[in-house]
Image (cartoon, rainbow, N blue to C red):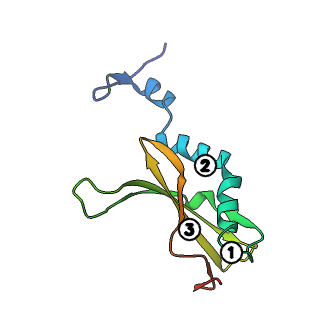
Amino acid sequence: MTVQNKNLFTHGTKQEKKEEQDPHEKQLAYLKKHEEEIKEFVKSQNSKIKSVQIDWNQTRWEDVGNGTPQGGGEVVSIFGEFNNLKDSDWNVLIEIKDGKVDLESMGISNGIRLGGELFE
C-alpha cells in the first residue's frame, strides 16, 4: 500500500513534487556543461593565468539591485582559483534571464586576486 500526502499549496503530491527539478540544479548542470567556456573567460583576463579551477560548491544565486523598484534581476556567482594557487581567487557573475543562464553576460566581479591583492 502506498500513501501519498497531498500538498495543499501545489495541488500535487510530495512524490510528484520531487520529480520536478529545482531551477538552480538545472542552471548548475548547464554551467558545468559550459565549464571550459568559463575557464577560458577567466584565462582571457590575464596572460599569466595558465589554468583555472572552479569550486562548484561555492556557487550561489543572488538577487541584484539597480536602484529601481523592480531590481536588477538574478545572477549566479561562480568562484575559483587559478594556476593551482591556494591564495588565488576570482569570481565570475552571470545573469539569469527568464530562468536561463546567459553566458554572454559573463563578467569578473572584484577582480582576480592573489594573496588578497589584484593580480597583474
Q: Given the image, on which type of amino acid does mark 1 rest? A: Asn
Q: Position of residue 117 (x, y in %)?
A: 59, 87
Residue furthest top as drawn: 1
- Disc 3, SS: strand
Residue 102 higher or lower than 93, as above or below: above
Q: Residue at x 67, y 45 (%)?
A: 33
Q: Earlier in the sequence, mark 2 or mark 3?
A: 2
Residue nearest the observer in this picture, 47 or 25: 47
Q: Earlier in the sequence, mark 2 or mark 1?
A: 2
| Disc 1 target residue | 46
Q: To which quarter of the image does residue 54 belong? A: bottom right
- Disc 2, SS: helix
Residue nearest the observer in this picture, 4 or 118: 118
Q: CA distance from mark 2 to mark 3?
A: 14 Å
Residue 51 higher or lower than 85, as above or below: above
Q: Is residue 66 left or right of residue 4?
A: left
| Disc 3 target residue | 91
Q: CA distance from mark 1 to mark 3?
A: 14 Å
Q: Given the image, on which type of amino acid does mark 3 rest? A: Asn
Residue 50 higher or lower than 5, as above or below: below
Q: Position of residue 50 (x, y in %)?
A: 78, 71
Q: Position of residue 2 (x, y in %)?
A: 48, 16
Q: Earlier in the sequence, mark 1 or mark 3?
A: 1
Q: Position of residue 82 (x, y in %)?
A: 70, 72
